[in-house]
Amino acid sequence: EKERIFSLTASPRNEAGAVIALIDQTEAHDAERMRSDFVANVSHELKTPLTALSGLIETLSGAAQNDAEARGRFLGMMAEETSRMSRLVSDLLSLNRLEDADVITRRERLNLCDVIEAARRSLSDHAGARGISLVLQGCDAPAFLLGDADQLRQVFNNLIENAIKYGDENGTVTINVTREDHAALLRGPAIRVAVTDTGRGIGQEHIARLTERFYRVDRHRSRQVGGTGLGLAIVKHIIRRHRGWLRIASKVGKGSTFTVLLPAE
Ligand code: ADP
């Protein structure tokens, strides 16, 4: 069982004795630790590109100044580090908005297939660059639900992008949409979308932690492919706001399937 933390307060002593109170501080302590871990993580994530940038600036103002080829290369690297920072900041802002109870999630009637199709289109160049084909199944008919198109677009963007980033080169990413009259988990009609890749897979010990902010299986690989470590945390929040479920199944060396279950209209 988890260790609990108490604080002890005592009233001043008088003839009747003293009152001693034990106050359970475990939750306040956990919240404080999470907050300080989060600040440490964000600082670290920003520090890495900043350190790279200041090194590049130094090199550019020295030897590389008169070398056109080196100058171009270094400027390209600077642009990359800058866009890494802006991705991080925009993911942090998204996450912050999603955690704010006052920010509403729209409930508009929409065809989930349109949302998925838009996400797929915007990622087709990225997939093409890795020789990956994006296959969409089950969208010959519409899949209606009530939801927030922008937020749902972000869910499928993140899931498909991950499948491309961590999928095998020249592999396949399959997006399969099915409709269920009665999903036990939702006690009603549902739309199920499974995003499957033929990639490296994820060890069982990591799966439960994947949606934590900044949790990565392979930090180096995530950095290489331009990840922020926040994508799946954002996905989890949006699905929760739509009263849905996310299930992750994976086999190391074979690939992964991220399944989203959402209440249908
Ligand atoms: P990142 O920006 O690092 O991709 P995410 O929150 O989107 O952050 O994902 C967290 C981690 O989960 C990734 O760093 C990666 O290790 C792992 N991951 C996510 N999707 C996949 C996938 N389709 N195949 C293998 N690993 C994945």
Image: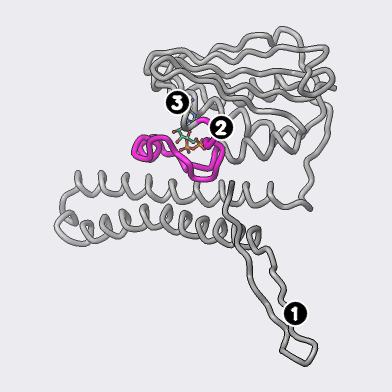
Q: Which numbered tag is attached to residue 19?
A: 1
What residue does disc 3 label?
202
Secondary element at tag 3: loop
Taking the spot 57% from the left edge, 19% from the top edge, the residue there is 195
Q: Is residue 18 located in the magenta-colored stretch of the structure?
A: no
Q: Position of residue 77 (x, y in %)?
A: 31, 46
Beta carbon of the mark 3 residue lies under 8 A of ligand 1: yes
Task: Mark 3 or mark 2: name the one nearer the start of the chain.
Answer: 2
Q: Is residue 213 located in the magenta-colored stretch of the structure?
A: yes
**Relative to 74, does residue 160 appear above or below in the rendering?**
above
Task: Find out whether the residues at labels 3 and 2 contact each other: C-beta distance under 8 Å.
Answer: no
Beta carbon of the mark 1 residue lies under 8 A of ligand 1: no
Gap in angstroms between the C-alphas marked 3 and 2: 17 Å
In front: label 3 or label 2: 3
Q: For this view, does 74 lie left or right of residue 22?
A: left
Task: Mark 2 or mark 1: name the one nearer the start of the chain.
Answer: 1
Query: Split into 4 quadrants, where in the image is the C terminus?
Result: top right
Taking the spot 71% from the left edge, 23% from the top edge, the residue there is 261
Taking the spot 69% from the left edge, 28% from the top edge, the residue there is 245
Beta carbon of the mark 2 residue lies under 8 A of ligand 1: yes
Gap in angstroms between the C-alphas marked 3 and 1: 54 Å
Q: Position of residue 240 (x, y in %)?
A: 72, 36
Q: Position of residue 153 (x, y in %)?
A: 66, 31
Q: Nearer the viewer, residue 181 or 154?
A: 181
Q: Which numbered tag is attached to residue 158?
A: 2
- What range is drawn magenta here? 207-231
In front: label 2 or label 1: 1
